[in-house]
Image: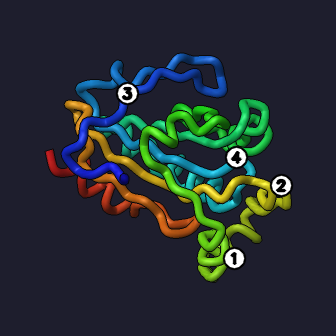
Amino acid sequence: MRLEKGNKAPLFAKEDFLGNQIDLFHFKGKKILISFFRGASCPFCNLRVHELIKNSRVFEEKGLVIIAFFSSSKEEIRKYTAKQNPPFSVIPDPGFSIYKKYEAESSVWGMFKAMMRIGAMFKLMTGGFFNLKTITDKPTLPADILIDEELVIHKAYYGSDYGDHISLGTIQQWLNNK
């Protein structure tokens, strides 16, 4: 069953790909965005990471902590996603332990739906995000969870295809409403 507004955020403590221990409880008192992605080679995922990086300064100034999960090993994250130098925690979870806590879903159909996003496909092809390794990644759909200062879910957004994330505008609007 999907998480909903008002649910307590499931706690976790995991090591990010750099070896830093990330404990959700330590972020109590801050607003948090947790994003779940497919494998680190996923072009749609890396495009979204790129968008988060571009907006990270504004988000950080508003007090937002971003935590990204990938269903990949540390090595795969270093090979693909880390090349963008994200200024936020990126956590490998190839065993899906945290994905399961947050009810992240899978769908092969999600890949086909994502490929129908002509604008996104153009950005992937021209932005250097596309690679063939992504074909072997599990068909995990994205999920974006906004968590308030009391570690309560403000919004749980479950994507319908590989490129379907909560809008940056929705995140910004939430941050502006104090």
Q: Position of residue 172 (x, y in %)?
A: 30, 54
* Element on which disc 4 rests: loop
- The amino acid type found where label 1 is placed reads Phe
* Element on which disc 2 rests: helix
Crowdedness near tag 3: few (<14), some (14–19) or many (≥20) residues, C-alpha within 10 Å: few
Q: Give the mark nearer the N terminus: 3 vs 1.
A: 3
The tag on residue 40 is 4
User: For mark 2, what is the residue?
Assistant: 133
The tag on residue 11 is 3
Crowdedness near tag 4: few (<14), some (14–19) or many (≥20) residues, C-alpha within 10 Å: many
Q: Give the mark nearer the N terminus: 2 vs 3.
A: 3
Nearest to the eye among marks 2 and 3: give it.
3
- The amino acid type found where label 4 is placed reads Ala
* Element on which disc 1 rests: helix
Please tell me which residue is depicted at 37% across the width and 27% down the height of the picture: 11
102 with respect to 114 (left or right): left
